[in-house]
Image (tube, rainbow, N blue to C red):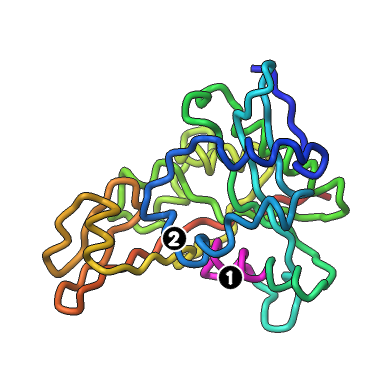
Amino acid sequence: MAVKITTLEERPELGDAIHDMPDDWPEFVQNDPVGWAHFPRLAGTFPEFTLIATDEEGVAVARAYAVPFVLGAPGRGELPPNGWDQALLWAFSDHRRGVRCDTVSAIEIMVRPDRRGRGLSGTILAAMRENVRARGFTELVAPVRPNGKHREPSTPMAEYALRTRDDGLPVDPWLRTHVRAGGVIHSVAPASMAVPGSLAQWREWTGLPFDADGWVEVPGALVPVRCVPEQDYATYVEPNVWVRHSLG
């Protein structure tokens, strides 16, 4: 499929299209408090790092968000264990203070569900790498959400992320796309996203009873959700995988 990929800064008229593009994120993921507070502001705050792909008819078929932050600041230095959430918090904090950033993190690459299976994810990842390089950065990092992990929620992420095929590439398709593009698996972010909620909220988000103490496997979740009926809450803590892309 032939697509045109530009930044939202270059084509601000596509702002509504990027927000309205259909996706299939599980409902509970959309209730991560950090994401809920910051994700809707990504395009307006970082239009130069927001990419949108349109097809021959001008229809938005993929989007990508990335954010700059200072990894080398005091108290930082290493990619954080609470990956996706922390990348957002650092980015918006650094933007508010107007500091010079040294690293860019991918936040989302999303292809419309009806346009998948055509290599678009790799295409827009390559465009993200080039956009970050063109802006003078030497590294792109990504708290990757492996898209096959939900089929094995009880498998530790550290074990899953390092599985490889006979050709040495990761078994997971999305990790494999990153490695093919030049990325290197760096570490697991064990608490990349956290979604706390009452049992009523979790029942609404998932349609599951959430009435027994223990771990609950939820469709779309990468690990089980901890349910505590005695205290009327359940919490999902999602691990992601940090991948580093050297752009030098």
- Name the residue at 21% across, 59% down: 216
Q: Between 189 and 198, which is closer to the camera in this rendering?
A: 198
Real-space Cα separation, disc 2 to disc 1, in angstroms? 12 Å
Q: Name the amino acid type tagged 2.
A: Pro
Q: Is residue 110 left or right of residue 190?
A: right
| Residue under label 1 | 80
219 over 68 or under it: above or below: above
The location of residue 192, given as percent across then percent down, is 49, 64
- Name the residue at 70% across, 75% down: 77
Say if the magenta span includes residue 84. yes
Q: Name the amino acid type tagged 1.
A: Pro
Say if the magenta span includes residue 71. no
Q: Residues within 10 Å of mark 2 (few under 14, many from 20)?
A: many
The location of residue 132, given as percent across then percent down, is 79, 49
180 over 28 or under it: above or below: above
Residue at far left of view: 212
Q: Residues within 10 Å of mark 1 (few under 14, many from 20)?
A: many
Q: Between 172 and 230, which is closer to the camera in this rendering?
A: 230
Residue at far bottom of view: 74
Mark 2 element type: strand
| Residue under label 2 | 239
Q: Which range of residues does the magenta coloring cover?
A: 79-90
**How many marks are shown on the rendered structure?**
2
